[in-house]
Amino acid sequence: MKIFLDTANLDEIRRGAEFGVLDGITTNPTLVAKENRPFRELILEACRILRGGVVNAEVVSTDTAGMVREGRELASWHPSIVVKVPMLPAGIRAVRLLRDEGIRTNVTLVFSPAQALLAAKAGAYFVSPFLGRLDDIAQDGLGLLREIVGIYRNYHFETQVLAASLRHPMHIMEAAKIGADIATMPYKVFEQLFQHPLTDRGLETFLKDWAKARESLGEIVEPTAPKIGR
């Protein structure tokens, strides 16, 4: 499963990229607005940091002509860019037109299997079901993901399933078990993937035992346990 960060913060993207396991990022207008930087400049810097990783950048128009126009512009900036398009009738028309021009798209704000089916039929490169937002209203986000993956496998759709709105590591592990192609997550959730109390406890014990062994040989050491993501 590919790992994306759901962020437009360049510091978070740099830190994530340093681990060598990051495959891309997802952004949206809300995340970009928080950074208070020119949109094009920010997206191009993210492309530079990720060195071939996927950078999802979203259109803001809600009509087909506007989405196609913005999609062409975004795609022209860098080959790593995938154009995010909202799940609207106008958006599905735009996805089909952009696909015919060889432009990759990500249909976002997907909340039902029917919407995901339409996105795949239109030729979307990614489809983004929002798991956490469904959980917030007492619906089964992972159940939606399971249905979409099942439908895509039945008909051998090439559209990749990008599990979005992931709130905690359990979301990510369950998405991996179901067979999502990609999981996108906030940086703080990415950090949590490294963590387990038994890892910390075991490392602390190993370092203390090593220090005692070296002290018995007349060496002075002060063991320090590394902190992931710090």
Image: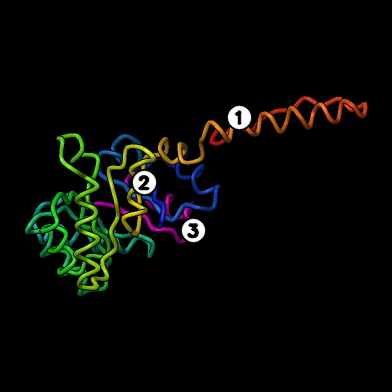
Q: Residue 205 lies in magenta, yes or no?
A: no
Numbered disc 1: secondary structure: helix
Numbered disc 2: secondary structure: helix
Mark toward the viewer: 2 or 1: 1
The tag earlier along the polypeptide, 1 or 3, is: 3
Q: Is residue 97 left or right of residue 208?
A: left
Image quarter hosting the C terminus = top right
Quarter of the view holding residue 71? bottom left
Residue drawn where x is 15% and y is 40% of the image: 139
Amino acid, disc 1: Arg
Image quarter hosting the N terminus = bottom left
Q: Which residues are magenta?
A: 38-58
Along the line of sight, the residue nearer the viewer: 213 or 133:
213
Specify few, some or many for label 3: CA neighbours under 10 Å numbering under 14, 14-19, or 20 or more: few
* Residue designated by label 2: 172
Q: Residue 83, how many percent across, how many down?
A: 26, 58
